[in-house]
Structures are given as C-alpha cells and as structure tokens.
C-alpha cells in the first residue's frame, strides 16, 4: 500500500461530524460543558491545525464527577450486578469497539499522530481484546477458604474465608502516547471488579477516549460508572489525584508527578498504582548488527557509546511534511513509517524531547 493511501488526506464523514461541535465531558451519564465554559484546542500534530475543541475541565467538574462515581458505587446497580451480567456488558463494549474500528483509528491518528495503519492493526483491536479478555474475569473473582489451627484451642473448628470486593471509586490519569489503549487498560480491570471510575485523559489527545465514552453508553454501562474529564494535568489531574472522595489513584506518566501522587496519598492512605517512565533508552553496543536497528529500536531514544554508531542511528525528522503513515528516509536510505510527534518539540528527535539546549548540544555533537 502506498504512503499516500495510508495517510489521512481528508477526514471521513463520520470524523468530520464528530469534530463539528466542541466535545463535552461525560459526567453522571450526561455530556456536559465545563463549569467555566472554557475549551481546549485539539491540534493535528501533522499540520498543527486546530481540528476540534474539548471542554477544559477543572476542580468543580472533577468534584461533580467524583460525586457521580461515588453515588453509582454506593447506590447504583454496578457493584451489585451479577458477575455474569457485568461480563456480558463488558464483552459488548469490546464488540462495539471493533464495530467502530475505522473511526477510532482515524481519531487516534489525527489526534496522536501515529500512522493510521498502526492504529487500525494494533491499537483498536487490542482495545477490544482487553474488554473481551477482562469480561471473562468478572466470574473469576473468587475468595479462599483457609484451614485454621488455634494453638490454645486445638479441638475448636473454625470456618475462615476471604471475599474480594471492589476498591470503590478509582481516579485514573492517562498520558498521550497510547490514548485509546491507555484508557482501556485503566478502565477494563476496574470495571470488571465492580469499581466506578473518573478518567482524566491527556489534554493533547482526548478524542478517542471521548468516542469510547459514547461506546460505553451504547453498551449499557450505567450512568455514573464511568466519568470522563478533559482538562489539564496541573489543574483537573492534580485535583483528581488529591481528591478525598477517591479510594484509589491509577496513574501513568512521569516519575516526578508519580512522586507527588504518592505523597498526596499519604493524607488519607488511598491506594495507588503507578506506571512511571523516563525515555526508554536502548543501549546499542559496538558489535550490534545494525541491520536490525530500526525494527528493534523504533519509538525509542538511543544511547550510542561510540561516534560511529551515533552517525548510523540518525533519528527521522517528523514535522509538518510527515502525515500519519508517511515514509521518512533515514541517512541509510532505508524506509520506515513514522508519524509526527504529538508536540512541536518532538519533531527534533531526542534533542527536542530533552527540552534542554545543553542536552541538544550534547546529542548533536556526534551526528
């Protein structure tokens, strides 16, 4: 398939209709504007054009979402629904994701910059697989019976068992690199166990998660079980992470922010799960077979210990001239599919990602 055919030259009618109006937040089963009335521009990283707007959620919107999730958990049908019925609903979500494969893949490519062929072949099918897989776990939430011997009363008989229960209201914060998959990886396990959720999506890439919210409603997920907030991390995200109405925080992002979440959780001893990262370096040794470098090191920053390797591993420049799925040439003359970065500084490869003049200079010395 040609590079032109793989790229998105003109958005489909479905995507055009989806982006016509500013997209709102899902709170308590309703799509609502931000309390402030503010919006955030959604940027196509391949062109830097504004392709849509989403609500700029803030603390008051998070408060409403947490109240809705708490009400759904304590008095709604979700936690008390039979495991088999909950599993059927989650499996239906997976089916609907596959039915919406094209629009989800297109939104993911326009919003995040990844090649649409990757979104179609990997991101969307894997999102469906996650809901299909987790739907089976709804009926596998088993406790244990435990034999017990009491030394001071050896003839006594006891019946000891454990019962697994949902944690409660979960605040989830996801990054921009795999927008749909990150949302699904957070949502599906929590919903399987009967939790309710407030999901704060990355302000750079909110579109596929919003469409996912519509799919969850179509599948029949009860109101308030999943609430989706669009907003900035330092406002909406920070308020969600520190909210005393949250029983657990699940966060994927920087180590720096992860430390702050752990510190905040000490105030009320809320549970925390963190997926933190740097820039995933690959160390390439002098005797490595360079023919396989792009296959093994795609989407990674490279630390090359010798100048000769630094020259060989020149990163492709992805900017306005690279639409999703475009083929960019490296100095070796080989071709590789590359999408534009989600932020302007990503166009400069590792130097741009570093965000430091000193780091740029150090990385560019041996190019």
Image: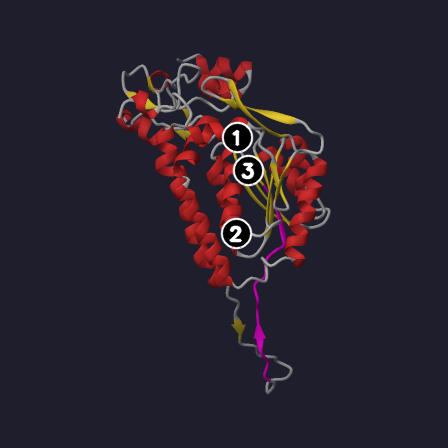
Q: Main structural element of the magenta stretch: helix, strand or loop? A: loop
How packed mark 3 is, by other alpha carbons closer than 10 Å (few <14, some 14-19, many 20 or more), is: many
Q: Decide whether residue 195 is among the magenta residues.
A: no
> Foreground residue, 263 or 328?
328
Q: Where 241 sits versus 16, above or below?
A: below
How packed mark 2 is, by other alpha carbons closer than 10 Å (few <14, some 14-19, many 20 or more), is: few
Look at discs 2 and 3 and give the one toward the viewer: 2
Residue 67 lies left or right of residue 296; in this view the side is right
Q: Earlier in the sequence, mark 1 or mark 2?
A: 1
Q: Where is residue 90 drawn, in percent x and y?
A: 47, 53
The image's colour scheme reads: secondary structure
Quadrant occupied by the N terminus: top left
Q: Is residue 247 visible?
A: no
Name which residue lies at 67% across and 27% down: 38
- Residue holding disc 3: 174
Q: Is residue 266 visible?
A: yes
Quadrant occupied by the C terminus: top left
> Foreground residue, 278 or 23?
23
- Residue holding disc 2: 220
> Foreground residue, 310 or 235?
235
Q: Earlier in the sequence, mark 2 or mark 3?
A: 3
Bounds of the magenta span? 157-172
């Amino acid at each position: 398939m040609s590079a032109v055919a793989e790229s998105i030259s003109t958005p489909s009618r479905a995507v055009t209709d989806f982006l016509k109006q500013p997209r709102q937040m899902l709170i308590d089963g309703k799509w609502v504007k931000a309390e402030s009335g503010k919006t955030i521009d959604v940027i196509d990283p391949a062109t830097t054009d504004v392709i849509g707007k989403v609500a700029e959620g803030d603390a008051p919107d998070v408060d409403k979402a947490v109240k809705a999730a708490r009400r759904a958990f304590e008095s709604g049908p979700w936690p008390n629904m039979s495991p088999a019925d909950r599993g059927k609903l989650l499996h239906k979500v997976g089916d609907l994701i596959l039915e919406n494969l094209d629009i989800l893949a297109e939104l993911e490519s326009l919003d995040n910059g990844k090649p649409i062929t990757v979104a179609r072949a990997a991101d969307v099918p894997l999102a469906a697989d996650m809901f299909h897989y987790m739907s089976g776990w709804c009926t596998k939430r088993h406790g244990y019976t435990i034999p017990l011997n009491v030394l001071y009363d050896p003839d006594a008989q006891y019946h000891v068992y454990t019962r697994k229960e949902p944690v409660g209201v979960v605040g989830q914060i996801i990054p921009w690199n795999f927008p749909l998959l990150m949302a699904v990886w957070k949502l599906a396990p929590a919903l399987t166990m009967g939790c309710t959720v407030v999901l704060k999506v990355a302000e750079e890439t909110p579109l596929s998660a919003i469409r996912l919210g519509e799919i969850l409603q179509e599948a029949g997920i009860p109101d308030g079980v999943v609430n989706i907030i669009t907003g900035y991390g330092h406002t909406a995200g920070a308020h969600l992470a520190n909210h005393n109405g949250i029983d657990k925080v699940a966060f994927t992002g920087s180590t720096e922010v992860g430390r702050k979440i752990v510190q905040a959780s000490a105030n009320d001893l809320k549970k925390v799960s963190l997926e933190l990262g740097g820039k995933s370096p690959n160390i390439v040794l002098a005797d490595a077979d360079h023919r396989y470098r792009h296959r093994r090191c795609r989407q990674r920053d490279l630390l090359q210990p010798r100048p000769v390797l630094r020259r060989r591993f020149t990163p492709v420049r992805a900017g306005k001239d690279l639409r999703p799925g475009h083929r960019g040439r490296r100095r070796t003359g080989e071709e590789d599919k590359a999408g534009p970065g989600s932020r302007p500084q990503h166009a400069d490869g590792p130097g741009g990602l570093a965000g430091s003049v000193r780091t740029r200079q150090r990385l560019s010395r041996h190019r």
